Amino acid sequence: MTRGTNMLFLMTDQHRVDTLGCYGNPIVHTPHLDAIAAAGTRLDAHFTPSAICTPARASLLTGVLPFRHKLLANYERNVGYAEELSDEFTPFSRRLRDAGYNVGLEGKWHVGKKRGPGEFGFDGPHYPGWHNPIAHPQYRAWLAERGLPEPAVSQEVRGTFPNGEPGNLLAGTLNQPADATFEHFLTDRTIAWLEQYGADYHRQGRPFFMATHFFGPHLPYLLPREYLEMYDPGAIQLPASAAETFEGKPLVQQRYSEHWTHDTLDPETRRWLIAAYWGYVTLIDEQVGRLVETLERLDLWDSTAVSFSADHGEFTGAHRLHDKGPAMYDDIYRIPGLLRVPGDPVGVESEDFTSLVDLTATILDLAGVEPDPEADGLSLLPITRGQTPTDWRQDITAEFHGHHFPYPQRMLRTPSHKLIVNPESVNELYDLVADPDELHNRYLDPAYREVRDDLLHRLYEQLRVRGDNFHHWMTSMYPVGGKGYDTSLSDFEGELHQEASAADRAQ
């Protein structure tokens, strides 16, 4: 086990896997993230436990799944769930502090409404909200000190809401140079922490964990013109799932398409939005390059593990959707995962199912801290060393609880199929080999009955073992196998009831 390793943890928000060169995009310029992949491990089946910011980030912090930590929705669209993380589970940041680490975080927090990073053991300010907090006084002071212009947006891009009003802001021109952007500001702040922590490491041997959480490439794509125009919309092909009809699928997907005004945008605008999104990815990649250069300059590269991931993905027109929501497609549930550990093999490409909560376990493992027995994740260090355990998970689950309104979902994904349980609507089953774009729901197809029933049983058993009460609905509604427990949770359904029933049958 590696002990006392320095760590630089990089995270983006709403980031599609297919925007990175190391994941096969031949156009988008991401040399610095690609270099991290080449120097370590690329996780090809890496998933978020929930494709919405706050639940995913709370899971990363605690190492447990959302239904357990119960921070289930972003507070801006809260639908009656908790707004602050309880102290039931110890965050990894406090455990690193107890192990003697410097622990810092610059960037997006979004784990709760009021309690910020400092209350969980991190150095660094609380930037509230889901978007770049351009009114934050530290950012405005940073601009003033450097004589840089304050942010202003022009040429806004919006669709039209179903009620006829202008839709959500999707993109626009940010009238600032790149070195005035909030992304550049966060990188400057991170560099200052690395210089301080690096000095402590070299003088005293005190290791550090430093996280940089960029707010992008989350929409709206507000960028300097050079990044908005970096990629040619004419060279972009719309995703195959743009042919989505929503036939045989939950109606909520059509409603979300309308909410995000997809069909009110012409095809040229849809391509332009993808090009803008790609420009945002490149802007962030350039900041990643600055951070890696800082590690090298400070003689920290050889002693620092570097990881990169995201809280969830983004639709960007896939399935005629934008943002994220109650539709459990790979576009938003599969996320990038890169991990470079000094001394480990390079160029590793893993198809093992991994989760964001595995990064929590890996952070503790790199620090030489015993794993939390309450946690749901597994350390990724065996995978980065080419020694995947024989009992590693063979599938992955995910959950959703609502955004704008309550909407519970559970998912089970294998290498070949995906099952989604939607209690208020039709369930979904996708054949990922024959239909990788998840266009055709096979849940009611008799040819898939055996696969469907197997996945229902597997999901049911996993939820029961974990204590996820969603399984109670499945008990009565779907062919999940023998129930094996008292579904009424009543004493009358217990031992006395069974004895009386046996006596009645004997008469």
Image (cartoon, rainbow, N blue to C red):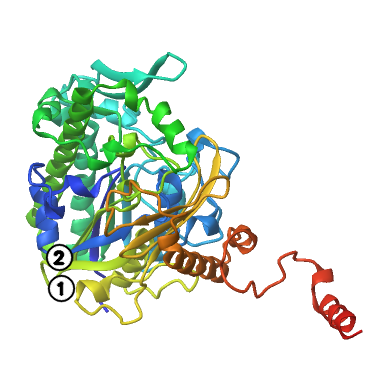
Reply above or below: 254 against 200: above
Residue 409 drawn above or below residue 278: below
SS class of the residue under badge 2? loop
Q: Position of residue 477 (x, y in %)?
A: 61, 58
Query: Which quadrant is home to the C terminus?
Result: bottom right
Q: Is 3 left, or right, of 478 in this rendering?
A: left
| Residue furthest front as drawn | 446
Residue contact between numbered discs 2 and 1, judged by CB atoms under 8 Å = yes
Residue 192, percent from left and from top:
21, 45
Which image quarter holds the N terminus? bottom left
Query: Residue 30, image x and y in percent?
Result: 11, 46
Q: Is residue 504 left or right of residue 334?
A: right
* Residue 160 vs residue 387, the one in the foreground: 160
Q: Where is residue 393 in the image (x, y as percent from the top left)?
A: 37, 72
Mark 1 sits on what residue?
344
Quarter location, residue 80: top right
- The Cα atoms of the two marked residues, 2 and 1, are separated by 7 Å
Of the numbered discs in the image, which one, if any, rests on residue 40? 2
Answer with the quarter of the image where residue 125 lies: top left
**Given the image, on which type of amino acid does mark 2 rest?**
Gly
What is the count of numbered marks?
2
Residue at x-position 38% and y-position 28%: 260
- Does 272 appear above or below 54? above
Q: Which amino acid does label 1 sit on?
A: Asp
Residue 406 badge: none
Residue 151 image-quadrant placement: top left
